[in-house]
Each structure stands twice: as structure tokens, then as C-alpha cells.
Image: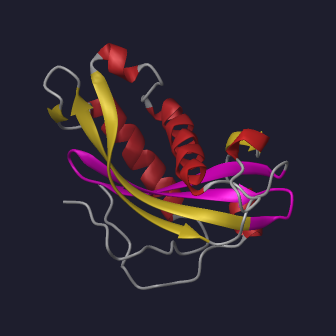
Amino acid sequence: MSTQPSAERVPHPSYEQLAGLPAYAEQPVPVAFEDVNGHLNVRHYTGIASEGLDESLVPLGIPQNWPALGHACFSAEHHLNYLSELRTGDRMSSRVRLLGRSERAAHALVYLLDDTHQRVSYVMEEIFLHISMATRRTEPWPDDVAANLDRRIAEDAQLPWAPSVSGCLALR
């Protein structure tokens, strides 16, 4: 298992630093997601970032149909940063950095990029849990998923920029 980064505040990575990571949930901002201010409604930032996180977990052994197989990931905590607005038609994508895991939880940063204007729009820090769908309680990660999470956490720890974490979320 990897340890978590310190809570010391560092700047968020730049668009250029994040653009090299795999892209998930790529799409334009649809008109239906616009609010009265003319930009992406606040409720959709988290949904799109969550879709990106879910997509990023598929290669680690956590498929979209995991609940049908008796497992799930449930969100436990979030910390959200809105950095720049996304407007209707702007191209957006999610990038994911895994920070650490415990026996039953994982810690991630999800970045929502404005690919049209090449800037970071939103950062979601999340703690998510492995759940048994039979008991609807936390359980240890399956061995294969734990190994894949550890591998990805180690790979992400080698990125040439430090993650900026809130300091209010921690694995237990």
C-alpha cells in the first residue's frame, strides 16, 4: 500500500501537466447542462468527474457492472475546487490521479479539464470505499483489485508534479 501525500498546499497542476494523462468522460458541455449563469451547472461538475473516475477504474478490475458481480465503489467524502467556468460547447475531459489506498478505501484526485481553452476547470478530491453489495458494508478490496490499485498508485506517485490535496480528507 502507498502512503498518502502530505496535506501541504501546493499549486494545482497545469493543463499541460495533466493533458498527458489518459482522458476520460470526453464530451462537449451540452446545452441541457447550462444554468442561468450561462455555464455548466454546479451539479454536473461532480457527475462528470465521477464518470471519469469510474472509467479510469475499469482497467484496474472495477468494471461498470461491478454491482451485478456483488461489489461496488461508494463515495465517502469529497472536496471540490472550481477554478474556471465551462460554457456550453466547450470540450471537456477528466484526468485521474490515484493517491493511496487502505484496506477498504482509496483516495483520488479527479481533474476536469477545459480542453477548448486549455485550462483546469475543476478539481474533485475523493475518498471512495469498496462495498459488498450483499451486506452493503465496506469490505477489503479483492486481492487482484488491491494489487492493481497499488500498481496505479505507484505509477501516479512518479508523476513529475506534486498533488495538491485539501488536507481535510484522509484514508482511515
Left or right? Give the position of 167 relative to 39. Answer: left
| Residue at (44% x, 54% y) in the render | 153
Q: Where is residue 124 in the image (x, y as percent from the top left)?
A: 50, 60
**1 above or below 4?**
above
Q: In which quarter of the image is the C terminus?
A: bottom left
Q: Quadrant of the N terminus?
A: bottom left
In this orientation, does residue 30 appear?
no
| Residue at (19% x, 38% y) in the render | 140
In this orientation, does residue 9 appear?
yes
Q: Where is residue 96 in the image (x, y as percent from the top left)?
A: 56, 52
Helix, strand or loop for the magenta stretch, by majority: strand
Left or right? Give the position of 78 relative to 94. Answer: left
Highlighted range, magenta = 90-119
Q: Nearer the viewer, residue 35 or 102?
A: 35
| Residue at (27% x, 18% y) in the render | 70
Q: Nearer the viewer, residue 21 or 137?
A: 137
**33 above or below 158?**
above
Q: Find residue 78 and report its image quarter.
A: bottom left
